Amino acid sequence: MATAVQREPAGISVDYVNEPDASSRSHSGKGTEACPGLKLVRVVAVSFGLLCILQVTLNVCLRVFVYPPAENKLKELTDQYFKQGWVYLHPGLYYVSSTSNTWHESRKDCLQRQADLVVINTKEEQDFTRKFNRFIWIGLFNNTKTRRWTWVDGTPLTKSYWGPEEPNNLENNSELCVESRFFNQDNSWNDIGCTNKNFWICEKNLAL
Ligand code: BGC
Ligand code: CA
């Protein structure tokens, strides 16, 4: 097979006007080849950018799926309690029984709910116990050792809401438990025998 080869005539040199000369070629499009430092900077910058995006994505995932913010946790928790009949009133959650029982059995029920009978520290809590127009056990009892009125959390009684003439220990010197009885009055408490049957209120403080 014949091959045609076109040669330049001997002694004639062709000047390729559009061909960049050697000096300008080194700074053209593929200049980074001649300047590897620049290429490295670009690679590092792009990698850094990608790492940042990855980190942000990871943070968002952790926040949403693994460590949800405290408010979400609180909402989840309170939603569960509301479904079980608890109501929120600062500073705690309160459960109002729908049946009646003795003071000790009522307390047992509260303890089983990871709570205790209500400790009244504020006027709001006191008024809450009167809202139900019922005799209601509260977490106050006469400590037979110290003969002092004591809250179930171990604190002594300071601010009280005894009804008129109460506590009177009327029934055979054995009125050792306290109910909220005179619900039409601000001062509603009465000391009464612990084996009477009343409704009760449990209180749970949310320690988050
Ligand atoms: C109760 C007493 C109470 C009195 C008040 C009685 O029925 O047993 O504890 O002090 O009522 O009126
Ligand atoms: Ca009494």
Image (spheres, helix red, strand yellow):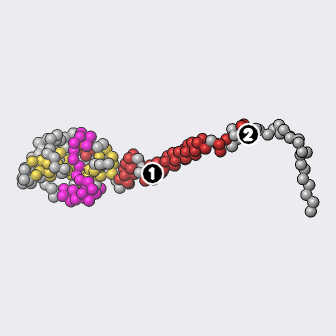
Q: Is residue 189 magenta?
A: no
Q: Residue furthest bottom?
A: 1
Q: Judge from the rendering whether residue 1 lies leftward or rightward of residue 199; answer left or right.
A: right
Count residues near mark 1 (Cα–Cα under 10 Å), then give few for <14, some for 14-19, many for 20+. Answer: few
Q: Which mark is residue 204?
A: none
Tell me the distance, in whole angstroms, between the alpha carbons under discs 2 and 1: 56 Å
Kind of residue at disc 2: Ala
**Residue 31 in view in this figure:** yes
What are the residue bounds of the magenta stretch?
A: 98-125
Residue that badge 1 annotates: 62
Of 89 and 10, the residue lying toward us: 10
Quarter residue 102 falls in: bottom left
Asked if the residue at tag 1 contacts the one at tag 2, i.e. Cβ–Cβ closer than 8 Å, the answer is no
Secondary structure of residue under mark 1: helix
Secondary structure of residue under mark 2: helix
Q: Residue visible at 33% across and 51% down?
A: 86
Q: Is residue 113 magenta?
A: yes
Task: Of the two numbered discs 2 and 1 on the same chain, state the one appearing first in sequence.
Answer: 2
Point out residue 96 in the picture as x, y percentages from the top left corner.
Answer: 29, 52
Q: Residue visible at 25% across and 43% down?
A: 125
Q: Residue visible at 89% across and 45% down?
A: 10
Residue that badge 2 annotates: 22
Of 42 and 18, the residue lying toward us: 18
Q: Residue visible at 89% across and 48% down?
A: 7
Mark 2 or mark 1, whichever is nearer to me: 2
